[in-house]
Amino acid sequence: MTSNVEDVFSLTKEDEAAGVTGRMYIPKIISQGPAKEWIERRRLTIRPWASFIDQKRFSRPKNFGEMCKRLVKNVEYFQSNYVFVFLGLIVYCVITSPMLLIALVVFFGACYIVHLRAAQSRLILFGRELSPAHQYGVSGAISFPFFWLAGAGSAVFWVLGATLVIIGGHAGFHELESAEGDELQMESV
């Protein structure tokens, strides 16, 4: 039984006929399917950055209820912008931590070696054949000490904490965007 994991990075005959090489090839899992649809939705729903960072639109909420309302509405409205903020914080964290960068290179290098090895021949260890999934697990286990030494756990919590503070602060203090379809709200007399 073959799995989709084995052919995620493989080129189709159409790709080879079009002259696509391994260096410029985007894995199928990203170039088609649910990942592509998700990325396309994020790209289409991104709000203008000028509106996102407009300082005139920031104010202190009157009370806790208004702050909660702003949080919910702004997270929904600026969801794609917040995804890019999150990804930017991840890139910043990786770039500023050389050991984490080395650990990621080791992990992805091991996965690439497993991918190449699985495409060429089967790996037999102690008389048992290891499936590609098991080989990826072994590469993760080999990379784990590097991630531990690089402080990947603290990096993950730093990124999550910074994301919550930045997004929470922005969503809580950014005034709500007025949509054209909003109903008029009237006070009772």
Image: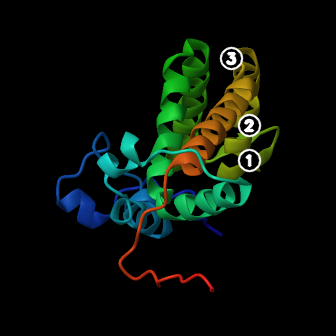
Residue 138 lies, in percent from the top left, at 74, 37
Residue of label 1: 134
Q: Name the element at disc 2.
A: helix
Which quarter of the rendered picture does the N terminus lie within?
bottom right
Which label is found at residue 175? none
User: Residue 48's quadrant in the figure?
Assistant: bottom left
For marks 1 and 3 on the same chain, the one whose residue lies earlier in the sequence: 1
What is the C-alpha distance between the residues marked 2 and 1? 6 Å
Residue of label 2: 138
At label 3, the amino acid type is Ala
Residue of label 3: 150
Q: Name the element at disc 3.
A: helix
User: Residue 123's quadrant in the figure?
Assistant: top right
Comparing 66 with 146, the one in front is 66
User: Residue 170's quadrant in the figure?
Assistant: top right
Q: Describe residue 32's horizontal placement relative to residue 82 as left or right.
A: left
